[in-house]
Image (cartoon, grey):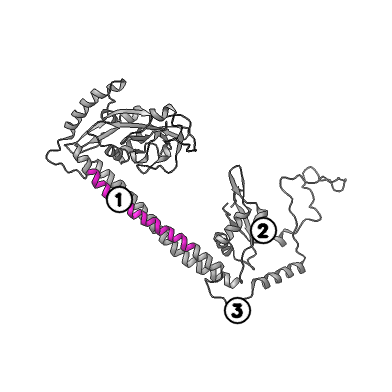
Amino acid sequence: MTYPDKLIRVRVDRRVVLPEFVAYAFSWEGTRARVREYVKTTAGQAGISGGELKKIELPVPSLAEQRRIVAALEEQISKIESGERGLTNAARRSGQYRRLAADLATKGGFAEPLTGDGTGPELFESIRSARASRVKTRRLKPATLSGPVPKVPAHWTVVSLDEITELIEYGSSTKTSESAEVGGVPVLRMGNIKDGKVDPRVLKYISADHPDAVRYRLQEGDLLFNRTNSFELVGKSAVYRDKFGPMAFASYLIRCRFLPGVDTDWVNLVINSSIGRRYVRSVATQQVGQANVNGTKLAAMPIPLPPEGEQRRILDVVETHQAAALRLESGIRQQGAKATRLRRALLTQAFAGRLVTQDPADEPAEILLARIRAEREAAGVTKTRRRSPHRAPAQRKRTPDTAPTADAPPPPRADAPDLAATTQPTLDLEIPS
């Protein structure tokens, strides 16, 4: 088996040190801190050379104690890893639970019609009238419904997204800056949409006096749809709230503003459910590693439409389920952090000599190493410097006696080392930068 040049192969003498012990040593924060002292960054990539790696000193107890340390670490870390696998499974099931709640909601699983709510078709008639009075541009004739129509309760209806919106537009293509200058306006980008919500932690800005700061300023309840991204992420959406402060939005997002009677959170739930994801996958186009869903295709997305009061009641039920799942996931992250700290503590104890008992009868590593060095010197084994593969060999003057024939390899050098005498077991280790 070969290995790429991003890895460094470390050869150890098993008479002195166990490969497993060395691997644990490089996972220990004490060794990693020493590694970082030699790390150099070139063209944005951090790395360490083999020559610098050789300078790093490792604590080496007796071979017998190494075996006890490795056995103890393997036993304890295997328990930690088992717990981490359980946490990973729990997090996956929590995510599945949240998606299931959204799917049930958008397909009528939580439907509770009440007297006085009316019906979805009745609501749509009032929305249609409002749209006719508000939309005066080329969108006056809405896009027709596209894709498979989801099954919904009898008192609901299914409409195209365009039929219930008064505005669908792309965002600003103005170049943004990472500097939050005085009065700068944050611009939401596709990275600010996560898990169906706006994440305002990492922002870029445009000048407050730029025309786009006004033209693309968001309003309470505007829905943002990510039109360009990877195939897995394209089509995610979130709802803007005034609590985030004044913001604009970038060109890879599409803003949708809905007519009275349509709860933006309801449409956001539909888009992020299996109904929306299935539709996005069916209409997305891919080019140069990016997927795209343009405004025309978004406008034709099928949206189940319950009565207005029922929309809010269903959203309340979904919020209860989502909150429970999020609490579970928060607990999972806390336990995962504890597992990481426990692993670090175990390694710290191990390399401080406090994890296992020390036996005075063990031969100290320095005595063993000194004896092996003496044996090597007595056997005449010396280190030779290998020629760099990128360095051309020195030209030697050839004589008729030393010149090779056309079909014969050159004779070995007189000072070439005996490979059999220098061969040692090897261990491949990845040394993270």
Badge 2 local density, few (<14 within 10 Å), some, or many (20+)? few
Q: Disc 2 or 3, which lies upstream in sequence? A: 2
Residue 209: give x, y in percent of width and height: 44, 29
Mark 3–mark 1 CB contact (< 8 Å): no
Is residue 171 something that shows in the picture?
Answer: no
Residue 317: give x, y in percent of width and height: 23, 47
Q: Label 2, secondary structure: give it.
A: loop
Q: Main secondary structure of the magenta part?
A: helix
> Could you tell whether 102 is left or right of 40 in the image?
left
The quadrant in which residue 12 appears is: bottom right
Which residues fall within the magenta stretch? 314-343
Whether residue 78 is situated above or below residue 407 in the rendered picture: below
Marks 2/3: CA distance? Answer: 30 Å
Residue 55: which numbered mark, if any?
Answer: 2
Examine the structure image and report whether residue 254 is included in the region drawn in magenta.
Answer: no
Name the residue at 19% across, 39% down.
Answer: 309
- For mark 1, what is the residue? 323
Marks 1/2: CA distance? Answer: 52 Å
Residue 360: which numbered mark, if any?
Answer: 3
Q: Disc 1 or 2, which lies upstream in sequence? A: 2
Q: Label 1, secondary structure: give it.
A: helix
Whether residue 1 is situated above or below residue 182 in the rendered picture: below
